[in-house]
Image (cartoon, rainbow, N blue to C red):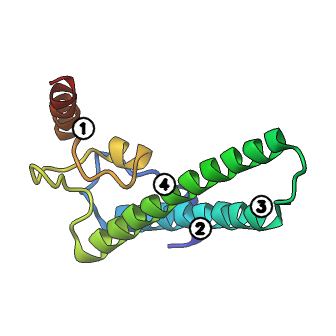
Amino acid sequence: MSASEVEEYRPSEDEPFMNDRQKEYFRRKLLSWKDEIIRESQGTLNNLQEENNHLPDIADRASSETEKALELRTRDRQRKLISKIDSALRKIDMGEYGYCEETGERISIRRLDARPIATLSLEAQERHERDEKVHRDD
């Protein structure tokens, strides 16, 4: 399948679930997302290294430190996201991609297209979030 065919292709619920075209579509989508995150994180690292740590004003230093802390938290979230992307890519290779980890049911193509690292069906995710909210309210 050529790159232009993949870019034009959109998986649908009408075709066999996780056929070769769908697997390739999601593999490319995940790899592209991962590459984008890595490029962004490299920019973040460059910015952190270039920042001038010798700001004379204490307010400027405090502001700079706050920005650095935010950048590092963002970088940590990106690292975790890359781990989830790698896990999804492994699942594609193993033939397990697109199935809910809780119920074993298929995750809808629409959900996977919107969130290709989804590991739960929409119903299981909603149930999980409701349970989490109940425990948080205790």
Q: Secondary structure at mark 1?
A: helix
Say above or below: 86 vs 53: below
Q: Residues within 10 Å of mark 4 (few under 14, many from 20)?
A: few
According to the picture, the residue beneath numbered tag 3 turns out to be 47
- Could you tell me residue 115's position as x and y percent? 40, 47
Towards the viewer: 6 or 111: 111
- Could you tell me residue 117's position as x and y percent? 36, 55
Rounded to the nearest angstrom, the CA distance separating label 1 from label 2 is: 27 Å
In the image as oriented, which residue stretches furthest toward the left? 103
Q: Residues within 10 Å of mark 3 (few under 14, many from 20)?
A: few
According to the picture, the residue beneath numbered tag 4 turns out to be 77
Q: Which mark is residue 35?
A: 2
- Could you tell me residue 70's position as x and y percent? 61, 47
Rounded to the nearest angstrom, the CA distance separating label 3 from label 2 is: 19 Å
Residue drawn at (57%, 58%) of the image: 75
- Could you tell me residue 16's position as x and y percent? 24, 57
Residue drawn at (54%, 52%) of the image: 73
Q: Amino acid at mark 3?
A: Asn
Residue drawn at (15%, 24%) of the image: 138
According to the picture, the residue beneath numbered tag 1 turns out to be 122
Q: Earlier in the sequence, mark 4 or mark 1?
A: 4
Q: Which mark is residue 75?
A: none
Q: Amino acid at mark 4?
A: Arg
Q: Looking at the image, is mark 3 or mark 2 nearer the viewer?
A: 3
Q: Earlier in the sequence, mark 1 or mark 2?
A: 2
Towards the viewer: 55 or 106: 55
Q: Secondary structure at mark 2?
A: helix
Whether residues under marks 1 and 2 lie with C-beta atoms below 8 angstroms apart, the answer is no
